[in-house]
Image (cartoon, helix red, strand yellow):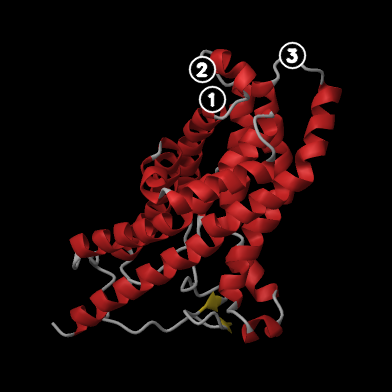
Amino acid sequence: MSDGAGCNRVAAATEHNPSITAKGVLNQTPATVAGPSYSNSQWNTSQTSLRVASDAASAACAAGLVAPFITILDRGIIENASGRSPLMTSIKTSFRAFLTRPHTFIASRPFRLISMVYFTTYLTANSIDTVSSTITPSPFTTTTAGTSKFLATSTVNMSLCLYKDSQFAQMFRAPSNAASAMAQSVPKFSYALFALRDSMTVFASFNLPPLVAPMLSDEVEKVVSRASAAQIIAPAAMQVFTTPLHLWGLDLFNRPGVSVAERVRKVAKNWAGSTAARMGRIVPAFGFGGVINAKVRRNLMGRLEAAEELK
């Protein structure tokens, strides 16, 4: 399922908070960013169209790389929850289709829905950074980690995910209930659970990494930057708490009228496997996807800054 769009704030810094450089090294003083200087009396509107294009290109690159895996795992989780197909059987079938008929897989509605969700989420996060660097003004590569980014990405991600979830639930319901599934609407309480699930995941993806990174051991730096590690660990760990919300919302749609005790048993039965699968799909979505989006954007914006200095 969805969870919420991704941007790794490895360059975010203020006077009162630690910063993480592009190499992921923790500093206790503001990061010095090379680039042209800007006056605080005017907006930094230079190369606006190219900066917007860079935001979109970064989002498209990240979404295109992670969408196949998320599509496969999301379908498997839903088919397993509905009883249509065991989790591993569904994953193997979808993965085989991706390898043998990639053009058909990419043109399918599930893939297009997933691509839409994550492209728009990444683009929203990037746009917030660009707007911030325009108004402040500050270098093109500047990233933010504040409330505005959380609210914007949460709103966009949750809105699109709620739509995607309802479509997936109807498309991949058990065959015995397929006829009634298309006519049955997703319960409002399911939407509420999905919204809570997504807000928790987006918070863990966009706001927790800068807080988690300073807590990681120096040993982590020998393998990967603390910024990148935190970007992967935080959203993955959150799935332990969000998976029950996800399964409960699905069960409300798949089995209306079932007792609370029966739902608890169903959720408990599927919790471990679904949590592992959701960790597997959230790592590319907001872990690797966030890192790819941030690095591509930083590279493109850095080139624009270099060109600006030559003027």
Identify the residue position indicated by label 1 in the image: 170
Whether residue 67 is visible here, answered yes or no, is: no
Q: Is mark 3 on a helix, strand or loop?
A: loop
Q: Are marks 1 and 2 in contact (CB under 8 Å)?
A: yes
Q: Tell me residue 114's x, y (percent).
A: 45, 44
Q: What element carries label 1?
A: helix
Whether residue 303 is visible here, answered yes or no, is: yes
User: Which residue corresponds to the image point at 60% horizontal and 49% vertical from the top-left?
Assistant: 201
Q: Are marks 3 and 1 in contact (CB under 8 Å)?
A: no
Question: Seen in the image, is 2 located left or right of residue 52?
Answer: right
Identify the residue position indicated by label 2 in the image: 182
Q: What element carries label 2?
A: loop
Residue 237 lies, with reference to residue 90, above or below; the image says: below
Identify the residue position indicated by label 3 in the image: 257
The CA distance from mark 1 to mark 2 is 6 Å
Mark 1 Cα within 10 Å, few/some/many (few <14, many 20+)? many
Q: Tell me residue 308's x, y (percent).
A: 19, 78
User: Which residue corresponds to the image point at 60% horizontal and 46% vertical from the top-left?
Assistant: 91
> Which residue is at the front of the view, 229 or 13?
229
Pick whichever of labels 1 and 2 is earlier in the sequence: 1
Question: Seen in the image, is 219 located left or right of residue 48?
Answer: right
The CA distance from mark 3 to mark 1 is 18 Å
What amino acid does circle 2 point to? Answer: Met
Q: Tell me residue 106's x, y (percent).
A: 39, 46
